[in-house]
Amino acid sequence: MHVWNTGYVEFEIVDDKVDPDVQVTTLHWTCTKDDGGDVGSSYGTTTAEIPVEPKSASEARSKIDWDALVQLSLGVEEVQRIEDSIDAQIVELKTPTSGGFTPS
């Protein structure tokens, strides 16, 4: 199973002088899969324009499913491409088609 994790969220505070809003701008994510000790992973960022409720970033930290927002921001096709790439990494680990070494 692929595990998605949001590692960092960037935001801006948009102040309209009456009721400031927190606007998420960038989501940093990782996706990993462990298949019997063979691990594949991917890291990236996605831009987003997501107004956040509640209005404080500290409350938003625990009340929002950030991993779901990352996948929503990326879109179904990109999520599938990333997961397929991780699966290909694991296949290469299990049955290598190339290699290298440091000469002595």
Image: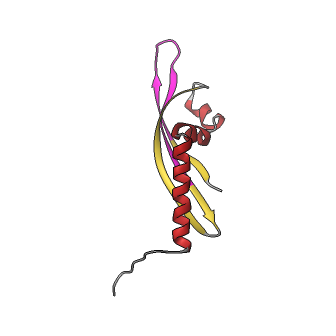
Q: From what the image shows, is residue 100 above or below residue 57?
A: below
Q: Of residues 63 and 26, which is closer to you in this image?
A: 26
Q: Of residues 98 and 42, which is closer to you in this image?
A: 98
Q: Is residue 101 left or right of residue 91?
A: left
Q: From what the image shows, is residue 20 above or below residue 101?
A: above
Which residue of the protein is positioned furthest toward the bottom in this rendering? Answer: 104
Q: Is residue 98 visible?
A: yes
Q: Position of residue 103 (x, y in %)?
A: 33, 85
Quadrant occupied by the C terminus = bottom left
The scheme the figure's colours follow is: secondary structure
Q: Position of residue 55 (x, y in %)?
A: 57, 24
Q: Residue at x 51, y 12 (%)?
A: 18
Q: From what the image shows, is residue 59 above or below residue 78?
A: above
Q: Of residues 39 and 104, which is closer to you in this image?
A: 39
Total marks in image: 0
Q: Which residues are magenta?
A: 9-31
Q: Residue at x 56, y 49 (%)?
A: 80
Which residue of the protein is positioned furthest toward the top in this rendering? Answer: 18
Which residue of the protein is positioned furthest toward the left in this rendering? Answer: 103
Q: Is residue 7 visible?
A: no
Q: Position of residue 58 (x, y in %)?
A: 58, 33
Quadrant occupied by the N terminus = bottom right
Q: Is residue 17 magenta?
A: yes
- Report the predominant secondary structure element of the magenta stretch: strand
Q: Residue at x 58, y 48 (%)?
A: 5
Q: Position of residue 17 (x, y in %)?
A: 47, 13
Q: Is residue 85 magenta?
A: no
Q: Is residue 37 left or right of residue 30?
A: right
